[in-house]
Image (tube, grey):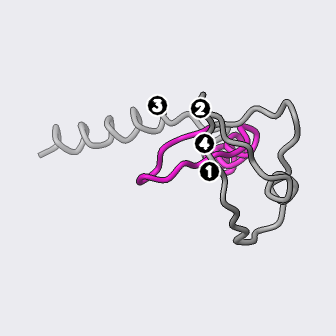
Amino acid sequence: MEHSSQQQEVHLGTQGRVVIPAALRRALGFRAGDALVARNEDGRLIIEKAEIIKQRLKARFAEVSGRSLSFELMKERRKEAKKENQS
């Protein structure tokens, strides 16, 4: 997927439809049938592949994979409670 700042004017149809120009679809790797997610971000319409969002989330949370965060939190709390009881 290339990262360029292509800009093209599009028009909103009467039923709220927007046609994404072919050049932008190619640049973004959009294909017919792709699941896309649309969101409002600071007054901008962001449209991206659901697959890309999943990849980004997996990468963000990869370091916690295989770890029990609840176990670590309980361990931390027990350690703090032990310190308090010793005081």
> Would residue 41 be counted in the magenta stretch?
yes
The residue pinned by badge 4 equals 12
Task: Specify start and end residues of the magenta stretch as a single range.
Answer: 38-62
Q: Secondary structure at mark 4?
A: loop
Percent coordinates x, y for residue 57 in the rendering: 64, 44
Amino acid under disc 2:
Thr
Amino acid under disc 4:
Leu
Q: Earlier in the sequence, mark 3 or mark 1?
A: 1
Amino acid under disc 3:
Ser
Amino acid under disc 1:
Arg
Say which of marks 3 and 1 sits in front: 1
Percent coordinates x, y for residue 23 in the rendering: 85, 59
- On residue 60, which mark appears? 1
Say which of marks 4 and 1 sits in front: 4
Q: In the rendered image of this protein, does residue 9 appear above or below residue 5?
A: above
Q: CA distance from mark 3 to mark 1?
A: 18 Å
